[in-house]
Image (cartoon, rainbow, N blue to C red):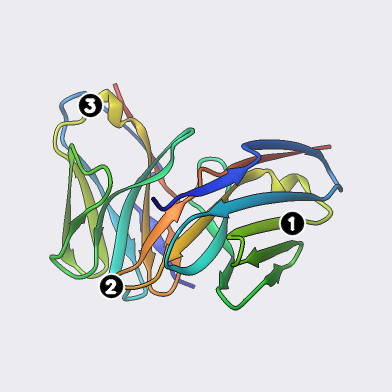
């Protein structure tokens, strides 16, 4: 069964600190992996997309890593800001046929002053 | 930038009402999706469409139907709204990546 598991479920950090969010998946065949940021009451917005051959991708203070062998990804946030408070969702796409994706349930991050 | 527009941010409807949620995308994408999002359950696929007048059931289609008469517009219909359909509804459009609308928070009372 295709699954995407994220950890932790929730996280509280102090402003300015770094944090790392984890995503483990069992999706096969794998096409790509995306991290989305979702502010409360809004739709998800894409942060990064990684294919099988990529193992690191950055978007400003966000850095995603992918280990396709162990089927793990992480999202590292550097020098957190209050505006980073949001849910972060890992989404894995299956290859072949029409697009099909499996969503993680997300990590809720709260950055406090 | 691809834009996906959902017609309402917040809706309150009564049990038994027929509810229409509208979604419009402006990038000529063939694939469009309707999800609902509930705490602890993540996003669950209700229906998707890969072409005009084409539709496929997702994981939780019961109580819903969809309409795609034009490529840019994908409508979700709650035939007879029930309280367990209170949720956040997200529309998405995709080519090589997903773009989501801002969501519609529906409350059924």
Residue beneath the point at 17% across and 69% down: B52
Quick one: SS at disc 3? loop
Does residue A62 sit above or below A87 in this rendering? below
Spatial CA span between label 1 and label 3: 40 Å
Please report, as a chain letter, where disc 2 is located: B
Mark 2 vs mark 1: in front: 1
Residue beneath the point at 43% across and 74% down: B96
Answer with left or right where residue A68 lies relative to residue A43.
right
**Residue toward you, A73 or B13:** A73
Q: Which residue ends up furthest to the bottom in the rendered image?
A: A53
Mark 1 vs mark 3: in front: 1
Q: Which residue is mark 1?
A: A76
Residue A31 is labelled as none
Would you say residue B101 is visible in this rendering? no
Please report, as a chain letter, where disc 1 is located: A
Residue A27 image point, x, y percent = 45, 59
Q: Which residue is mark 2?
A: B30
Would you say residue A19 is visible in this rendering? yes
Does residue B90 sit above or below B108 in this rendering? below
Q: Answer with mark 3 or mark 2, whichever residue precedes in sequence.
A: 2
Q: Which residue is mark 3?
A: B82
Residue A42 image point, x, y percent = 50, 47
Residue B47 image point, x, y percent = 25, 52
Please report, as a chain letter, where disc 3 is located: B
**Residue toward you, B18 or A35:** A35
Q: Are marks 1 and 3 on the same chain?
A: no
Residue beneath the point at 86% across and 48% down: A16
Residue B10 image point, x, y percent = 39, 38
């Amino acid at each position: 069964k295709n699954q995407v598991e994220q950890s932790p479920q929730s996280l509280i950090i102090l402003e300015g600190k770094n944090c790392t969010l984890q995503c483990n998946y069992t999706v096969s065949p794998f096409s790509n992996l995306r991290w989305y940021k979702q502010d409360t009451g809004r739709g998800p917005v894409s942060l990064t997309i990684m294919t099988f051959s990529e193992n690191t991708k950055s978007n400003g203070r966000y850095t995603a890593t992918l280990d396709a062998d162990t089927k793990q990804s992480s999202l590292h946030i550097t020098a957190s800001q209050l505006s980073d408070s949001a849910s972060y969702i890992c989404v894995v796409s299956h290859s072949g046929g029409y697009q099909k994706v499996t969503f993680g349930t997300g990590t809720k991050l709260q950055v406090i002053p | 930038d691809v834009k996906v527009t959902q017609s309402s941010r917040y809706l309150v409807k009564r049990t038994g009402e027929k509810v229409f949620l509208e979604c419009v995308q402006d990038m000529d994408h063939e694939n469009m999706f309707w999800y609902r999002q509930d705490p602890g359950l993540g996003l669950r696929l209700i229906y998707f469409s890969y072409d005009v007048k084409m539709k496929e059931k997702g994981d939780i289609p019961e109580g819903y139907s969809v309409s795609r008469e034009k490529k840019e517009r994908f409508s979700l219909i709650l035939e007879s709204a029930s309280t367990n359909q209170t949720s956040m509804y997200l529309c998405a459009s995709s080519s090589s990546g997903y773009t989501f609308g801002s969501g519609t928070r529906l409350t059924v009372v």
